[in-house]
Amino acid sequence: MDSVKRYFAAVKITNPAHRAYWIASRRIRKTAEQYFGGRMLEIGCGSKTKGPLVGDYVTEHVGLDYPDTPHDKANKDRFGTAYNTLVESDPFDCVPSTAVLEHREKSKLALKEAFRVLKPGSCTINTAPLFWQVPEKPRDLIGSNGCGLDYLSRKVGFQLAELTAPSGFGVTLFAQLIYFLRNFRKGPLIPLVDASIIFNNPIVLLVDLGGMRDEHIV
């Protein structure tokens, strides 16, 4: 099983974001293959699931999350915040931070901290949604059209190597339809809704590969 499939195995087929996760995972791995190496600090590591996805490109994977994280603390290597990682020495070679910036009130400060803990010439990967559900109320604060990430990244010292939208209208349309169907997942309708989600999830990937794809690279 390749790295993306091993990482993706934890995402259930009944998850409305099933195929959106798949698309994002492929993009993250492709970018990491080009830029990652050495010691990696994952800021906002959650359950530290990025190991199977990009861990083979680095010599050490250090997972950091905030002390009150709802995720299993057993998987964390360090505790801190996106604003203060408490890393004072031994800078890192790469810093992935996926689906984290949209939960921060001060995204610029989070990017500034990532820049601080990186060795000169090293790389960070950041992802944030432009249009998506609000799964972590009240901690979903912003979306990003890419231009905002570009502006903030340059302000703190990063030189942008790549800015891309992994998917566009078609994927968003079908993903939102699946999230809408989930509203009816109650009582005797649960099996029917799950079946509908399982049926529609592959369509997201077909749309992503087909003529409705409108990926933009800035």
Image (cartoon, rainbow, N blue to C red):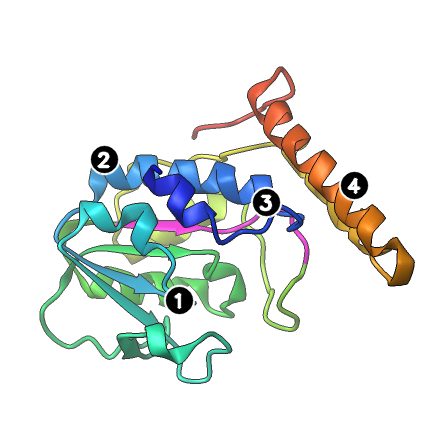
In the image, residue 40 sits, relative to residue 9, either above or below, namely below
Q: Classify 10 Å Cα crowding around label 1: few (below 14), some (14-19), many (20 and above).
A: many
Q: Residue at x 26, y 75 (%)?
A: 77
Which residue position holds label 1?
Answer: 44
- SS under mark 2: helix
First in sequence, mark 4 or 3: give its number.
3
Q: Which mark is residue 196?
A: 4
Q: Amino acid at mark 4?
A: Ser
> Is residue 128 found left or right of 52 in the rendered image?
right
The image position of residue 43, as x and y in percent, is 34, 65
The question of residue 131 being in magenta is answered with yes
Which residue position holds label 2?
Answer: 34
Q: Amino acid at mark 3?
A: His
Q: CA distance from mark 4 to mark 2?
A: 38 Å
Q: Residue at x 84, y 47 (%)?
A: 192
- Kindly give the residue lying farthest to the left in the view shown: 90
First in sequence, mark 3 or 1: give its number.
3
Q: Which mark is residue 18?
A: 3
Q: Is mark 4 in CB contact (under 8 Å) with mark 2?
A: no
Q: CA distance from mark 2 to mark 3?
A: 25 Å
Q: Which residues are magenta?
A: 124-133
In the image, residue 66 sits, relative to residue 12, either above or below, namely below
- SS under mark 1: loop
